[in-house]
Image (spheres, rainbow, N blue to C red):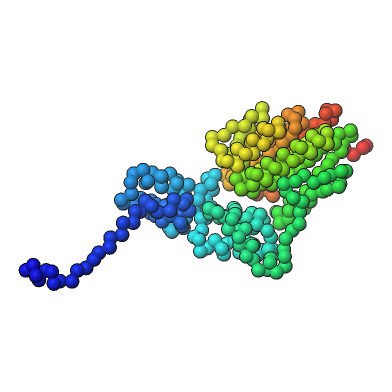
Amino acid sequence: GNADAISRPVINFIVDQFDIEEEPKSRDPYKNVLLKELIIFKKVRPGISKQFANKLQNIAKSYASEGKKIFIVKNNIHLIYPDMDERKEIINKAHAFGHFQSESTYNRIKDDYYWQGMVDDIKQSIKECKPCQRNNKTITKYHPAQVSQVSNIFKRVAIDLILGLDETEEGYIGILVIIDFLIKAGSETLLIGCIYCPIINHFANEVSICIDQACKEFKERNLNGMLVCGDFNCSNLKWNENGDWYFDRISDGEQEFLDVVNKNLLYQNVSVPTFQLNDQVQKSFLDLVLTESNTRITNLETGPVLGELSRGHLTMTWSYLFKNNKNFHNQFKREK
């Protein structure tokens, strides 16, 4: 019997000691199969430790699913979280609209889609765009991290044109914004700037440099006032009527923004939410107005959503007070 057993062929089994908890820790469901299973099937795979399961469940709270389609929930809004194979096509379709740069391409996508690393994917796709390479489609601008020298009124003017809006009762179909970066009213000379920051965590350093340089220019040239406004996209920050900020949680980019505002002793004047959700709820303080003094801005009010849409940024109006106590609007009234 023993001889018979010895003569039989020996089969070696290699046991895979793969530990399912060594799966990638990415928050991208399409790079983390355990997270994807939890989002779609609402169950944690058997054999996972309780501690690891709790981590997955905390991450999964930011997601929802419909069949096999995955959504990420941001500010109670469901954005499609596309599969990795679909992302390139989404970017190319948005970019091909006019072969615009990464910021414009991102703005065309952000209201419908989101995925981890989306901005980097957009930049890489545009770098690989053959029509853009062939035509060398690069826009030359003032460097965003430097303050341009402005010696007189109308030396530098910014123009922004928005078309495609619903026609108003007065027959308007667009908005034309013209900003003179140096305004002289009476005996006062003001430095005025406008900032748009699509994602504060990606561009916090650039925003900080811009504000630092503007404050340096303001002090070195001994100007009378400074006004910096725009969409800073700090969705976690809030301000009260005294200009004091507060938050429940804060990102690294938002902390860097607060640091540069506090360092330069700037005053933030907006104390009401400036973004409206689809359900008419006004939530985030995305649009801010910064001045060198807390006595500059009065009568700040929000109006309807820009473009008369149900969701978006609210319009804002305010009065700017000069040191001679005259109102900005009064300076430009037509003489009777």
Residue in the foreground of this view, choosing between 58 and 21: 21
Identity of the residue drawn at 76% across and 42% down: 193
Identity of the residue drawn at 84% across and 40% down: 183
Identity of the residue drawn at 89% across and 33% down: 187
Relative to 167, does residue 317 appear above or below in the rendering? above
How many discs mark residues in the rendered view? 0
Relative to 325, does residue 151 appear above or below in the rendering? below
Residue 113 appears at what percent x and percent y?
56, 55
- Residue occupying the far right of the picture: 336
Relative to 42, does residue 94 appear above or below in the rendering? below
Relative to 186, does residue 116 appear above or below in the rendering? below
Say whether residue 12 is left or right of residue 205: left
Residue 132 appears at what percent x and percent y?
69, 65
Quarter containing the C terminus: top right
Q: Is residue 300 visible?
A: no
Residue 285 appears at what percent x and percent y?
63, 39
Quarter containing the N terminus: bottom left
Identity of the residue drawn at 36% across and 43% down: 51
- Residue occupying the far left of the picture: 1
Residue 250 appears at what percent x and percent y?
56, 38
Q: Is residue 10 visible?
A: yes
Say whether residue 85 is left or right of residue 165: left
